[in-house]
Image (tube, grey):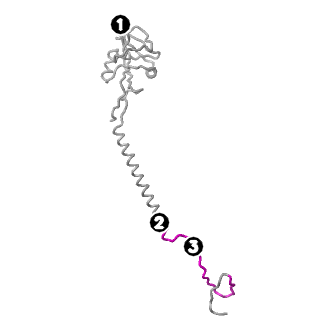
Amino acid sequence: MDNQRRPMNAGDSQSSGDVISSNLTIESHEPPKGNKKKPCVYKIIAIIIFLVILIITLATVLAVEKHKSSTEHVSCLDGWIGYLGKCFYFSENTTTWAASQNFCAAHAANLAVFNTTKELNFLKRYSDHSQYWIGLRRKPGQTWQWIDGTIYSGWLKIIGIGECAYLHQIGISSASTHLVRKWICSKPDTCIPRS
């Protein structure tokens, strides 16, 4: 045999002792190596955009929370209960109707004034089976009048012949002004800056 080597084609047979070399070219369908960098750049840009949006969102949320906390308001003072646009105070002590009204006035309020069954039921629910002076009174021989000057419509019967009304679990009764009871103050629900 010849010492020369010749390239073999795929169909040639090989005899023993011959060294085979092949000039087969295999085509690859992979993208060129230079294109591998572009997807990486796109990922980095996407991450940067995401982080910028996240930072802006967090800054906005923090600014809103800071503004909210500095302007947040409480409806009623401590010890007062808010309901349907009013603040109510239920005393724990007892005193006369006039002294009760003086206490309420010192807190920019009046003895409780209410005009709906909802308010009445709310007040009865918090009255803990006690008797509370309310802002309803009459002069002998005259009609009932609320402390704010409005005439009582009579939507709920007042039991008794006294000059001042009080609330209890069953409804509203009246008694003499010199008797002592707990009292309920009411005033409009106004926003109070939180300190």
Residue 63 placement: quadrant? top left
| Vertical position of residue 96 compared to residue 24: above or below | above
Residue 173 placement: quadrant? top left
User: Is 17 a magenta residue?
Assistant: yes
| Lateral position of residue 170 relative to residue 93, left or right | right
Q: Which residue is mark 3?
A: 28
Q: Say which element carries label 2.
A: helix
Upstream in sequence: badge 1 or badge 3:
3
| Lateral position of residue 130 relative to residue 9, left or right | left
| Vertical position of residue 8 compared to residue 109: above or below | below
Which corner quadrant holds the N terminus? bottom right
Q: Amino acid at mark 1?
A: Pro
Contact, CB < 8 Å: mark 1 with mark 2?
no
Residue appearing at x 42%, y 9% in the figure: 160
Q: Position of residue 118 (x, y in %)?
A: 46, 22
Q: Which residue is mark 2?
A: 38
Q: Which residue is mark 1?
A: 140
The single residue placed furthest to the top in the displayed view is 141
User: Is 180 a magenta residue?
Assistant: no
Q: Say which element carries label 1.
A: loop
Q: Say which element carries label 3.
A: loop
Q: Position of residue 11 (x, y in %)?
A: 68, 82
